[in-house]
Amino acid sequence: MKVVFGNDDVAGKNISYFLEKNFAVDVIGLKEHPIYHDYPEKDANARKGELIIVPSQHKSLKSIRSLTVHAAGNFDTNDYGGAKNKMTPFDAKYARGVLLNIDKYAKGLNFEVTYEATHHGPYSENPLVFVEIGSSDLEYGDREIGYMMARSIYESFDEDAEIYCGVGGLHYSSKFTKMALNEGVALGHIASKYRFASLTPDSLSEMYQKTIDSQGFLIESKSFDSLQRNSLKKMLESRSLNYRFI
């Protein structure tokens, strides 16, 4: 495992400090934020296929106190780093392990623990997982939270789970998060319902191929009308991708 963070990112530095100090994990600080730094595996001197963790801050317009895990990638434009129409590989089992640890250690701290839908860069050929503190300076630099997030990363484990990509829901993927926490399901790349217009057979294939060991797709039925559901079915079936509505 390699850890990269941005020197301009308070939360990233906070988590990385404890990973290095308390858990003897090597960390690499980048001059620019990792979302704009494609192929971070080169700076991290990572082996082919070695997992990269990016501790980072998460911004929310509503300043929601949140602790999040998510994949990197773009469904169309790359305004926030990465490559257009490209996903970065994602280790869904490891990411679920981090999420389970955060949920355990954050109890009573008044944070929303959640997957986020796939968004922003960087592009990498190595599996990469974002682990974030949101959503204001007060939380970013909190030493207790920084240590707890570092511990959650360090103690993550590849517990057996069914692995799926997700389609539907909001940017904060509450239903998929509940499934991960309670039903032995690990989510890989997630497209919120707002991404429907950007979904194509190619982008769905990209989500599937870049989610390590994916078994197919879970689609949140209530997010779409009947025409949209039929469209999703046709696109997935055109690429022989398994799916089920939930």
Image: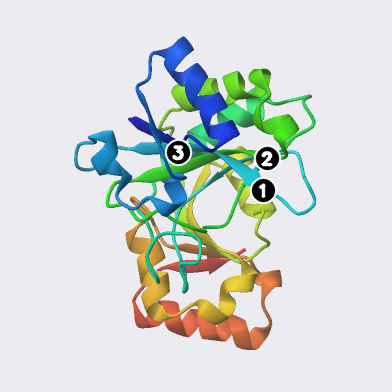
The residue positioned 64% from the left and 54% from the top of the image is 173
Query: Which residue matches tag 1?
Result: 59
Front one among 169 and 143: 143
Tell me how far mark 1 sits from mark 3, CA to CA. Answer: 15 Å
The residue positioned 60% from the left and 65% from the top of the image is 192
Query: Which residue matches tag 2?
Result: 134
Query: Which residue matches tag 3?
Result: 54
Q: Secondary structure at mark 3?
A: strand
Tell me how far mark 3 sits from mark 2, CA to CA. Answer: 14 Å
Q: Secondary structure at mark 1?
A: strand
Q: Is residue 163 left or right of residue 11?
A: left
Front one among 124 and 246: 124
Q: Is residue 114 left or right of residue 124?
A: right
Q: Quadrant of residue 191?
A: bottom right
| Residue 199 seen | yes
**Are circles 1 and 2 on residues that touch, CB within 8 Å?**
yes
| Rendered location of residue 1, percent (x, y) | 33, 30
